Image: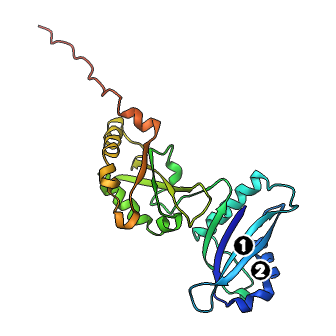
Amino acid sequence: PVHACFTLQKPVSELVDHIQKLEYDIYEEIGVPETKVAILSMHPSGESNSTNVVFGFLSNPVHRPISPVALSVLRSSLIELFLRRSNLTLTTPIFGQPSKFEILKFRGGITVIPVQSASIFQITQFLFNFTLYNSISEIEHKCIELRDQLKYGLHLRSYENLFVRLTNKNGSTMSSPVIVQASVMDSFGNMLPQRLKQLAQTITHSPARNLGLNNSDFGKVKSISLSSYLKGTLHASPPTPSPTSAPQP
């Protein structure tokens, strides 16, 4: 199942007569073949005269599962809406502008790449991961603090960039836990083996220091794990200097 939600600045009483139109608008914006949109619930949100709308994508016809390709396209569309990189455009006179878009459930999980200071496509592999008992939404809102605190905790240098991506296996931006995958690159797009070894040692000895993350912001870091590549640097021998020839008499 695929469930998501958003908020409309309209009371429920003004929306109940327009459910079919709302389903149509959502499908026109982000629908994929062999699916249909169903409004699952409407209830007042915490704000005055606003409504939280929960909707889902159902296979159409019901007996045929949504294809992997369609699910992939749908997952990307929902993540773009969550990250506010695209807008969900509805019939404005009836619904106004939706806000606070969240993904509630997506089969197979979701992985979100927050806005980075440099292109994450430069990353060839992630070096380590850990688990936080926050939601993707909470971490995404504090992503600058996350990166800054990790940089401090890992003793990164000014020319080294940290990249992260966030995964929730239940496919929700609102539930915990979240697996944080991280990588580090210098300004030239690589890291020397000896520097990677230093980084691996810092991470390995960091659980007591919570990777530098503030407990009040992110809670306790769990399940720190190095990639096999980074783990291998811990046991790599330093390069031996080439022998110099003895001076001739």
- Give the x, y percent position of residue 58: 79, 64
How far is mark 2 from mark 1, CA to CA?
A: 10 Å
Residue type at the position of mark 1: Phe
Q: Does the rendering let one see residue 161?
A: yes
Residue type at the position of mark 2: Leu
- Give the x, y percent position of residue 243: 24, 17
Q: Which mark is residue 190?
A: none
Q: Nearer the viewer, residue 19 or 232?
A: 19
Q: Nearer the viewer, residue 136 or 143?
A: 136
Q: Is residue 66 above or below residue 49?
A: above
- Give the x, y percent position of residue 72: 70, 55
- What residue sits right under mark 1 in the picture? 55
Q: Residue at x 33, y 37 (%)?
A: 197
Hey, which quadrant is residue 88 in on the image? bottom right
In which quadrant of the rendered image does the N terminus lie? Answer: bottom right
Asked whether the beta carbons under mark 2 and mark 1 sit within 8 Å of each other, the answer is yes
Q: Does the rendering let one see residue 30?
A: no
**Label 2: element kind:** helix
Residue 27 falls left or right of residue 215: right
